């Protein structure tokens, strides 16, 4: 729609990407990176499903309302973005393209390397989403893209080298996908797991030991060594998880 509104009257935000908008991405600046993240309304809370392989535990402890996400204005903005994506895909992608270009310019001015995470609170296969025949990774080959996913095919495609060269994917462990996670690790991919104790996070999965990475040091997953378990400390609602999602 040309009036800047979605069909339900929600106003479209002026910008889709948040730049270093949470404490973990800010940590990336010490390593020389500036991060842009796209946050949508997770699961099917918008009326559209953006997390097709979510588990009960993942849905229950989602970080959508963590930090500034708890603010009503932030939730309204994420909803407007989600409706925009599903109902007016072309103009959404055009705006996303402009935002990435703006991030690249800002990073260059301030002496940082730009990187983008398109699934801040979603799990969309961005390697299949195209604007004028090209994915965002193809349109911005000078930008490092990265995401977490619970879609085994996505994680295995990355592990096997079948993803764009500038798109890094980490598989997310839930209470019910251990078999898929081990398969990803065996093929050279990485797995992120949430633990209750940041000091006691172990790297055991499938009766095997894997390299352990502290995922709270930064959000820059593309810097992790292959075949690593990325240990994340349970935060927010995850501290009270009873589904088995938190290890």
Image (cartoon, grey):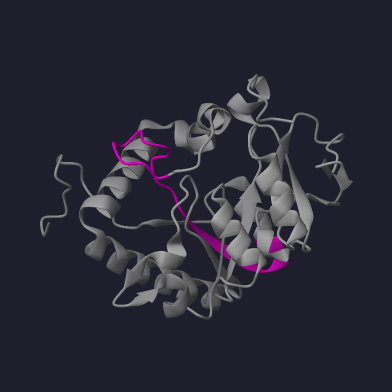
* Region rendered in magenta: 29-50
Quadrant location of residue 28? bottom right
**Is 136 within the magenta?**
no
**Is 34 within the magenta?**
yes
Side of 153 where 126 appears, left or right: left
Q: Is residue 95 visible?
A: yes
Q: From the viewer's side, name the closer residue of 122 and 73.
A: 122
Q: Is residue 13 visible?
A: no
Location of residue 36 with respect to 161 vertically, above or below: above
Side of 45 where 236 appears, left or right: right
Residue 213 coordinates in the image, percent (x, y): 80, 52
Q: From the viewer's side, name the closer residue of 129 and 216.
A: 129
Which residue is located at x 46 percent, y 69 percent? Answer: 103
Side of 227 where 102 appears, left or right: left
Which residue is located at x 31 percent, y 49 percent? Answer: 81
Location of residue 190 with respect to 45 vertically, above or below: below
Which residue is located at x 53 percent, y 28 percent? Answer: 56
Quadrant of the image containing the N terminus: bottom left
Side of 127 where 226 appears, left or right: right
Residue 34 coordinates in the image, percent (x, y): 58, 65
Residue 142 coordinates in the image, percent (x, y): 53, 80
Quadrant of the image containing the C terminus: top right
């Amino acid at each position: 729609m040309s009036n800047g509104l979605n069909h339900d009257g929600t106003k479209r935000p002026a910008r889709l990407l948040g730049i270093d908008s949470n404490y973990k991405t800010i940590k990336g600046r010490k390593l020389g990176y500036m991060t842009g993240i796209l946050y949508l309304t997770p699961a099917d809370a918008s009326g559209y499903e953006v997390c097709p392989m979510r588990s009960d535990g993942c849905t229950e402890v989602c970080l959508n309302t963590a930090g500034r996400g708890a603010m009503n204005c932030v939730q309204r903005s994420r909803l407007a973005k989600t409706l925009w994506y599903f109902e007016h895909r072309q103009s959404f992608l055009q705006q996303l393209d402009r935002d990435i270009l703006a991030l690249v310019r800002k990073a260059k001015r301030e002496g940082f390397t730009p990187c983008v995470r398109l699934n801040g609170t979603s799990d969309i296969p961005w390697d299949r989403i195209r604007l004028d025949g090209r994915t965002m990774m193809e349109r911005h080959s000078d930008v490092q893209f990265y995401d977490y996913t619970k879609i085994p095919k996505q994680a295995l495609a990355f592990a096997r080298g079948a993803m764009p060269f500038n798109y890094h994917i980490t598989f997310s462990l839930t209470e019910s996908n251990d078999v898929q996670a081990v398969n990803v690790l065996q093929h050279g991919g990485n797995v992120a797991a949430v633990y209750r104790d940041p000091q006691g996070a172990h790297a055991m999965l499938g009766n095997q030991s894997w390299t352990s990475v502290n995922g709270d040091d930064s959000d820059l997953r593309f810097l992790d060594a292959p075949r690593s378990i990325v240990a994340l400390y349970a935060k927010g609602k995850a501290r009270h998880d009873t589904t088995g999602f938190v290890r």
